[in-house]
Amino acid sequence: MIPILINSIEEMSTICRQMIGKVGFVPTMGFLHQGHLSLVKEAKRISDVIIVSIFVNPTQFGANEDLSNYPRNIERDIKLLTELDVDYIFFPTNEQMYPNDFKTWVNVDKITQVLCGRSRPTHFRGVTTIVTKLMNIIEPDFMFMGEKDFQQLVVLRQMVKDLNFKTKIVGCSIKRERDGLALSSRNKYLTKIGREKALCLNKSLLLAQKLFNENIQSSDEIIAQMTDLIEDNEGVIDYIEAFDPNTLEHITNIVSGSRIALAIVIENTRLIDNIKIN
Ligand code: AMP
């Protein structure tokens, strides 16, 4: 069945108010890949009605970032979502989401200033604001988000808790290409050589796990070796950090359950990835 396409906020709200059964919502910026589709599959498993939004949210991009080039292919997205029997695709316009008199922002403190927040200081404010708007329009029972954007997941969990949203966030594992590269819409920017180099993200995370298995627990020591591997592949490091998965606080001693995340620039494309150390 072809999903019902909706671009009016009013119409989406009205439909959602009349829905019967559990509503599962997957927010995306489109240009879908198997990572996004894994969220839809998880949504289908535990919800009765599936809504996927496609909106390239301008407020989460910094001034010098890739908003205007961000890859888009709505026809292909619709085809992929049709194959998964999604019920509704919500793709509002910028003008509706951010009318000229828009003035309100949702901001989560502290945990938005570390990791990706250091080099993207306004990014999470854009994410929390758009997700609040989408949750208010749709009022889903479940919202599905990838661990690929681990900090985003933690920030949104905090927001849902602090602001008493009724929606439950379901975190889903990172989907990768066969060679380990985490799926991302931004992989499209990479040349063949760049794509080869980009394997250093996952390889360095696996190296961290290997060092931990060999009883090395010092985050400095592990990160130093990861840094070498990434620099050997001409990756420019934005950050590599070991942190507590609940507080996002930096840790010096890695334990089972700690996360290591990184943001690396390859051929001008900023890529992120992370691992849970076991
Ligand atoms: P985006 O379209 O990049 O905003 O991503 C929409 C959702 O898909 C977010 O919750 C992401 O964390 C999730 N996502 C993106 N890439 C992956 C991946 N490789 N594996 C799992 N989830 C992903």
Image (cartoon, rainbow, N blue to C red):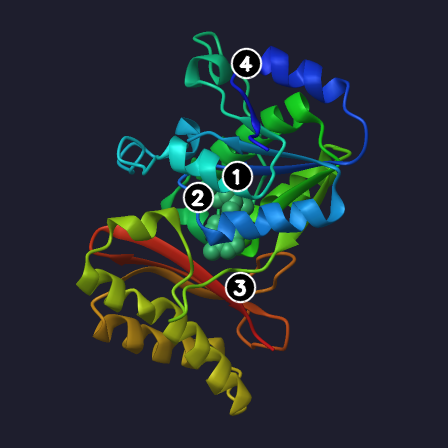
- Measuring 55% from the left and 30% from the top, which residue is drawn there? 2
Residue 29 appears in the rendering: no
Q: Residues within 10 Å of mark 3 (few under 14, many from 20)?
A: some
Residue receiving disc 1: 81
Determine whether, in the image, residue 190 is placed left or right of residue 114.
left
Amino acid beneath label 3? His
Label 2 within 8 A of ligand 1 by Cβ: yes
Q: Nearer the viewer, residue 100 or 255?
A: 100
Marks 2/1: CA–CA distance = 9 Å
* Image height of 206 relative to 236, above or below: below
| Nearest-to-viewer mark from 3 and 4 | 4
Amino acid beneath label 1? Leu
Please tell me which of labels 2 and 4 falls first in the chain. Answer: 4
Marks 3/4: CA–CA distance = 43 Å
* Image height of 88 relative to 194, above or below: above
**Residue 8, numbered circle:** 4
- Measuring 63% from the left and 71% from the top, which residue is drawn there? 257
Place of residue 144 in the rendered image (x, y in percent of width and height, measured from the top left): 63, 45
Please tell me which of labels 3 and 4 falls first in the chain. Answer: 4
Secondary structure category for the residue under label 2: loop
Residue receiving disc 2: 32
The outermost residue toward the right is: 21
Place of residue 12 in the rendered image (x, y in percent of width and height, measured from the top left): 63, 18
Q: Residues within 10 Å of mark 1 (few under 14, many from 20)?
A: many
Secondary structure category for the residue under label 4: loop
Quadrant for residue 245, please give it. Answer: bottom right
Please tell me which of labels 1 and 3 falls first in the chain. Answer: 1
Residue 54 appears in the rendering: yes
Marks 3/2: CA–CA distance = 32 Å
- Position of the N terminus by quadrant: top right
Q: Nearer the viewer, residue 201 or 263?
A: 201
